[in-house]
Image (cartoon, coloured by chain):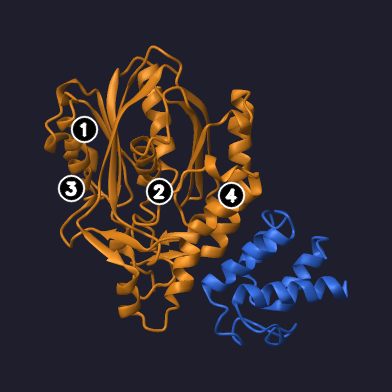
């Protein structure tokens, strides 16, 4: 689980094109200016790739505003 | 269905807006990032007084100049979400302006799924015997709805009109339609003050709002299902399809669809770089460019898929004649 969580944080960092140290479980759209609408799309695309298309039916991912929420949703859907 | 496409013409407004203009208006935008994700470097912008009906007329006149006898046309269907008026019907105005006889004429208020829906309706008119041939034209001026500082919409949308001459055919060339809707997503792509609905929230915007993330998730969920449904209905596989022409939403969306369906990239036609997302016209413009670029040969089996605002979606197969 810890490894999966770290992989997700890395994916988010890469999607937002920021240093991975800047992405923590506490990160939110308000704490990262790079996390705008395009940044959010990049995160969704990258996570969709990572989980081989299984993100597609998880509508609530569209409106997440924090890393913590992303991790919760992924866990609830047995992806991590 | 024994229907065929006999001609496609399109019209692009003269004004070309590059991403330099976006940067001029919005210095804080990361244009390289936007361009990389959208795949769009320029868009076409209708002039202030130019409407979707004007552009539709231009596209139709190209069909006429290429040999279509307008007096023989039994129907004119205009797919638009930018009508000249809420009433009367813009297709009636178009009928008069292009000198058609007193044919069937009506609008279809759909966006990105509009061409496939329009093709289904056109095919039904012909199959039922109500018509033998007609014009289906897709035209929109979405840019008039967009705020110049809207980072979600402005880099994407573009204005254009595309018209096609559809006729009865001697071969079974169009079919296996899969059409659908999900109105729970109605407010994810919307111009709130564009109709009769008055909300208790008095701040109804006159500008286009799109939740890119929600529309993306809908697309990733639904488009693969549409493709597979059309294949199942027609007893075909991906390998049987010579070319996929998806609604040209953005590079990011098309790439994701290709990845989901594991489509060979050479079978997916993309042409949005210097045109942008022209709503319902994208599929026709792409088809036209594919034909002119020798990407389509007689006998090729082509899948068309449109999806978006509504939510609404449509897919079908055509055998190119």
- Disc ID at residue B111: 2
Which chain is indicated by disc 4?
Answer: B
Q: Position of residue A29 (x, y in %)?
A: 60, 81
Quick check: B187 left or right of B121?
A: right
Separation of disc 2 and disc 4 at Cα? 19 Å
Quick check: B280 left or right of A30?
A: left
Q: Nearer the viewer, residue B51 or B253?
A: B253
Q: Earlier in the sequence, mark 3 or mark 1?
A: 3
Query: Are discs 2 and 3 located on one and the same chain?
Result: yes
Chain A's colour is blue
Q: Nearer the viewer, residue B77 or B66?
A: B66
Query: Are discs 4 and 3 located on one and the same chain?
Result: yes
Q: Earlier in the sequence, mark 1 or mark 4?
A: 1
Colour orange maps to chain: B
Q: Earlier in the sequence, mark 2 or mark 4?
A: 2
Q: Earlier in the sequence, mark 2 or mark 3?
A: 3
């Amino acid at each position: 689980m810890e490894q999966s969580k770290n992989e997700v944080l890395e994916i988010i960092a890469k999607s937002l094109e920021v240093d991975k140290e800047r992405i923590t479980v506490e990160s939110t759209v308000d704490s990262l200016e790079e996390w705008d609408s395009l940044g959010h799309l990049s995160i969704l695309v990258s996570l969709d790739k990572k989980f081989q298309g299984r993100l597609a039916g998880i509508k609530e991912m569209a409106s997440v505003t924090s890393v913590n929420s992303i991790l919760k949703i992924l866990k609830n859907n047995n992806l991590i | 269905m024994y229907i065929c496409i006999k001609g496609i013409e399109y019209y692009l407004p003269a004004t070309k807006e590059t991403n330099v203009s976006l940067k001029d208006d919005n210095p804080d935008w990361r244009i390289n990032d936007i361009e990389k994700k959208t795949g769009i470097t320029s868009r076409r912008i209708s002039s202030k007084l130019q409407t979707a009906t004007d552009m539709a007329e231009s596209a139709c006149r190209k069909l006429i100049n290429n040999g279509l006898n307008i007096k023989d046309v039994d129907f004119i269907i205009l797919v638009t979400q930018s009508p000249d008026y809420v009433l009367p019907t813009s297709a009636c105005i178009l009928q008069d302006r292009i000198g058609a006889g007193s044919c069937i004429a009506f609008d279809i208020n759909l966006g990105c799924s509009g061409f496939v829906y329009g093709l289904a309706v056109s095919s039904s008119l012909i199959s039922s015997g109500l018509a033998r041939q007609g014009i289906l034209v897709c035209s929109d001026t979405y840019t008039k709805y967009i705020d110049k500082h809207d980072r979600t919409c402005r880099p994407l949308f573009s204005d254009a009109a595309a018209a096609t001459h559809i006729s009865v055919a001697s071969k079974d060339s169009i079919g296996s339609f899969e059409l659908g809707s999900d109105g729970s997503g109605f407010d994810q792509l919307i111009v709130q003050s564009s109709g009769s609905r008055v909300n208790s929230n008095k701040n109804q915007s006159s500008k286009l709002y799109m939740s890119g993330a929600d529309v993306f998730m809908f697309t990733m969920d639904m488009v693969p299902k549409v493709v597979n449904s059309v294949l199942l209905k027609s007893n075909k596989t991906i390998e049987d399809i010579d070319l996929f022409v998806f609604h040209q939403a953005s590079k990011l969306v098309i790439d994701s669809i290709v990845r989901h369906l594991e489509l060979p990239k050479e079978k997916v036609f993309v042409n949005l770089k210097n045109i942008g997302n022209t709503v319902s016209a994208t599929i026709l413009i792409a088809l036209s460019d594919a034909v002119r670029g020798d990407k389509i040969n007689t006998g090729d089996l082509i899948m068309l898929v449109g999806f978006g605002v509504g939510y609404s979606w449509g897919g079908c197969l055509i055998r190119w004649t």
